[in-house]
Image (tube, rainbow, N blue to C red):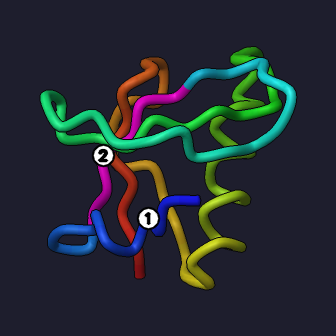
Amino acid sequence: MINPADYIIDNSLRIIVKPGKKQNYILGYDYERKALIVEIKARAQDNKANKEIVKFFSKLLKKRVKIKSGHTSKDKILIFS
Protein backbone atom coordinates (compact mmCIF):
# COMPACT_ATOMS: atom_id res chain seq x y z
CA MET A 1 0.00 0.00 0.00
CA ILE A 2 1.13 3.55 -0.68
CA ASN A 3 2.39 5.56 2.28
CA PRO A 4 0.27 8.73 2.40
CA ALA A 5 2.88 10.48 4.57
CA ASP A 6 5.07 10.71 1.45
CA TYR A 7 2.47 12.97 -0.20
CA ILE A 8 1.79 15.39 2.66
CA ILE A 9 2.89 18.91 1.72
CA ASP A 10 2.68 21.76 4.27
CA ASN A 11 0.59 19.56 6.60
CA SER A 12 -2.05 19.02 3.93
CA LEU A 13 -2.97 16.19 1.60
CA ARG A 14 -5.17 16.21 -1.48
CA ILE A 15 -7.35 13.15 -1.99
CA ILE A 16 -9.94 11.90 -4.47
CA VAL A 17 -12.59 9.81 -2.72
CA LYS A 18 -14.50 6.85 -4.15
CA PRO A 19 -17.22 6.07 -1.58
CA GLY A 20 -19.28 2.89 -1.25
CA LYS A 21 -16.47 0.41 -1.91
CA LYS A 22 -15.72 -2.95 -0.25
CA GLN A 23 -12.90 -1.68 1.96
CA ASN A 24 -10.93 1.41 2.93
CA TYR A 25 -7.90 1.41 0.66
CA ILE A 26 -5.46 3.77 -1.03
CA LEU A 27 -5.53 2.90 -4.73
CA GLY A 28 -2.74 5.11 -5.97
CA TYR A 29 -1.66 8.62 -6.82
CA ASP A 30 -3.02 10.80 -9.62
CA TYR A 31 0.00 12.79 -10.82
CA GLU A 32 -2.14 15.05 -13.01
CA ARG A 33 -4.39 16.13 -10.15
CA LYS A 34 -1.65 15.71 -7.49
CA ALA A 35 -3.94 13.70 -5.21
CA LEU A 36 -4.18 10.27 -3.61
CA ILE A 37 -7.05 8.11 -4.84
CA VAL A 38 -8.84 6.56 -1.86
CA GLU A 39 -11.65 3.99 -1.70
CA ILE A 40 -13.92 4.29 1.34
CA LYS A 41 -16.49 1.75 2.57
CA ALA A 42 -19.02 4.31 3.79
CA ARG A 43 -21.51 5.82 1.41
CA ALA A 44 -21.56 9.54 0.66
CA GLN A 45 -24.74 10.11 2.64
CA ASP A 46 -25.24 12.02 5.89
CA ASN A 47 -21.51 12.84 6.15
CA LYS A 48 -20.66 9.13 6.68
CA ALA A 49 -17.88 9.02 4.08
CA ASN A 50 -16.24 12.15 5.52
CA LYS A 51 -16.23 10.66 9.02
CA GLU A 52 -14.77 7.42 7.65
CA ILE A 53 -12.02 9.35 5.83
CA VAL A 54 -11.01 11.18 9.03
CA LYS A 55 -11.00 7.92 11.01
CA PHE A 56 -9.05 6.03 8.31
CA PHE A 57 -6.29 8.62 7.96
CA SER A 58 -6.10 9.22 11.73
CA LYS A 59 -5.40 5.53 12.35
CA LEU A 60 -3.07 5.24 9.37
CA LEU A 61 -0.89 8.26 10.17
CA LYS A 62 -1.47 8.48 13.94
CA LYS A 63 -2.23 12.20 13.65
CA ARG A 64 -5.28 14.41 14.04
CA VAL A 65 -7.04 14.90 10.73
CA LYS A 66 -9.58 17.48 9.58
CA ILE A 67 -11.16 18.10 6.21
CA LYS A 68 -10.11 21.58 5.14
CA SER A 69 -12.15 21.72 1.93
CA GLY A 70 -14.34 19.50 -0.21
CA HIS A 71 -16.95 18.49 2.36
CA THR A 72 -19.50 17.85 -0.40
CA SER A 73 -17.06 16.94 -3.17
CA LYS A 74 -15.03 13.85 -4.09
CA ASP A 75 -11.93 16.07 -4.23
CA LYS A 76 -10.84 16.95 -0.70
CA ILE A 77 -7.95 18.55 1.13
CA LEU A 78 -7.04 17.11 4.52
CA ILE A 79 -4.98 18.94 7.13
CA PHE A 80 -2.95 17.27 9.88
CA SER A 81 -1.93 18.38 13.34
Instruction: Check if residue 59 falls in the magenta segment.
Output: no
4 vs 48: above or below: below
The magenta segment = 12-17
Residue drawn at (57%, 78%) of the image: 61
**Disc assigned to residue 23:** none
Residue 34 image offset from top left, x and y in percent: 18, 41
Callout 1: 10 Å neighbours few (<14), some, many (20+)?
A: some
Say what amino acid the circle numbered 2 marks: Arg
16 vs 63: above or below: above
Instruction: Give the side of residue 3 with respect to residue 21, left or right.
Output: left
Instruction: Check if residue 14 falls in the magenta segment.
Output: yes
Residue 66 image offset from top left, x and y in percent: 48, 59
Which SS class for mark 2? strand
Q: Are marks 2 and 1 in contact (CB under 8 Å)?
A: no
Q: Nearer the viewer, mark 2 or mark 1?
A: 1
**Disc assigned to residue 14:** 2
Question: For this rendering, which residue is in front, 9 or 64?
Answer: 9
Say what amino acid the circle numbered 1 marks: Pro
Query: Residue 21 appears in which quarter of the rendering?
Result: top right
Residue drawn at (27%, 34%) of the image: 30
Task: List the single residue furthest toward the front.
Answer: 1
Q: How many marks?
A: 2
74 vs 33: above or below: above
Question: For this rendering, which residue is in front, 21 or 62?
Answer: 21
Residue 29 image offset from top left, x and y in percent: 34, 42
Give the labeled residue for mark 1: 4
Query: Residue 79 appears in which quarter of the rendering?
Result: bottom left
